[in-house]
Image (cartoon, helix red, strand yellow):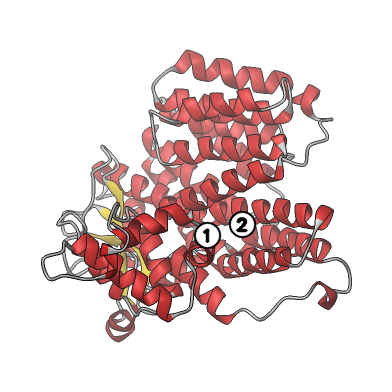
Amino acid sequence: MGQQANVLRPEQSPQHRFGYTLRELRKARHFSLRGLAEKAFMSHSKLQKWENGDRPPKERAEVELVDALLRAGGILVDQWERISPSVSAPTDVSVSAPHVSEGSIGLATAASQQAASDHEGIFVPARLQDGSVVFVTLDRRALLRGGVGISAAAALGVGTPAVAEADVLAKRPARSAAAYSDTPVEHLQRARRLLIDNDNLLGPRHAIKATLEHIQAIKDLRQDSQGVDRQSLMELQTQYAEFAAWLFQDLGDFDSAQFWLDRAFQWSHTVGDVDLTSYVMARKAQLAGETRDLVDVVDLAEAAQRMARPRSRLAAVARTYEAYGHALRGESTDSERAIDDVRNSLDRVSGDATPWGVWLNEQYVEVHRAHGLEALGKHAEAAEIFTSAIRALPQGYHRDRGVYLARAAVAHAGAGAPDEAAAVGSQALTVANDTGSGRIIRELVRLDQSLIPWQRQVEVAEFRATFDAVLAHES
């Protein structure tokens, strides 16, 4: 089977043609199978199955990363698209974008595998002719020529994690531990702390490239390290992967967020840090809640609690995400019980020595209670809690303020206060443009839809017109 795959015959399927091209490009670029697999963050057995035509790739992001690593110029992506008629090419805003309605929200996401390279495409929210909003890839050059949706592109424009990672790999210099005035781990720990702080102030788009660069720098340093140093670097690499997942989650690119959470979960097992693994599992539950995955959100949160130390802070963090999962499923009693359990545990877990989930406090729990109340239709109570949380936010939490503002606006609309909803929504829109937070934009899409019954009111009309102006539009 393997030897036959080395010869391309005209009658071979597109799947085998893809595998043949992949193998020839890999050899031409002097990559071993294992070497390329490591750079692409996948197992060598998966890559081997691709080459042999035994199993086609499922994720566009993975194909794009391998294509970029091999400097294939899109050849592999093009051949992958021919394997199955169900595989679609990157979507321009001028054509119908594939999307799935999300009930009353009418919001859908074009997955990260639809994105073009950072040089050719920009990941932006766009309004279709039917009024719904999707996240699509705009041609960067056409965008600049036409001047459509520039503010939205500026707010949300980044390439896929695959291409961003490939750009980093192509440009990285050799790494030496001796280059640092202190230890590499200490230097990269400080860098991560700064990136986290700047993320809330400036938004995810500014931190993604640096975060991916640091992941690769750590991998390079690990090649020449041993013992404790190698273990510390692996732990730091896991932490950076989790942070990369958060950045893509905030950007609204949930597929990429899942990709990096999966990497973090895998690497955390290599580290052997139970708290870190438990935290990443809890984050997977949080992401499931963000995507409104009614099947997995509670199961993942319960799994994180089983993994966490009993009565620990991380168990309380996972229980918080479980509460929102119950709310999404309409299970009001279970949601309130979970929130009460977390509130009652705050004093006990405050002294927990783990560095994970240190932000778990009364305000954080109240915000999640409000999020759950809004999902349960208790809009007025949710709006009141969000408003209190906004007042209590410290300076510098610009993005979080925008998220709370957007959710408060949705709650105000649900409570029948359209003027207040439009005013608060306009403030959230300013933060969305400042930070590029796709989470804020998604909440504002919900707000835009919920304000339709009052669209003739002046304040509502002004908000909807302003929001519409930052979106690209289907021609």
Which residue in the structure is indicated by mark 2? Answer: 398
Dot 2 alpha-carbon crowd within 10 angstroms: few under 14, some 14 to 19, many 20 or more:
many
Q: Nearer the viewer, residue 47 or 162?
A: 47
Left or right placement of residue 440 versus residue 283 in this view = left
Label 1 amino acid? Val
In what element is the residue under mark 1? helix
Left or right placement of residue 55 versus residue 223 in this view = left
Going from N to C along the chain, the mark reached first, 1 or 2, is: 2
- Of all residues, the one furthest to the bottom in this rendering is 145
**Quadrant location of the C terminus in the rendered image:** bottom left
Residue at (46, 36) in percent of width and height = 289
Label 2 amino acid? His
In what element is the residue under mark 2? helix
- Residue 282: x %, y % from top left: 58, 35
- Residue 226: x %, y % from top left: 80, 59
Residue 14 versus residue 234 in the image, above or below: below
Left or right placement of residue 219 versus residue 456 in this view = right
Say whether residue 116 is visible: no
Residue at (66, 26) in percent of width and height = 315
- Residue 221: x %, y % from top left: 73, 67
Residue at (38, 28) in percent of width and height = 295
- Residue 339: x %, y % from top left: 59, 22
Q: Residue 38 occupies which quadrant of the picture?
A: bottom right
Q: Nearer the viewer, residue 133 or 281?
A: 281
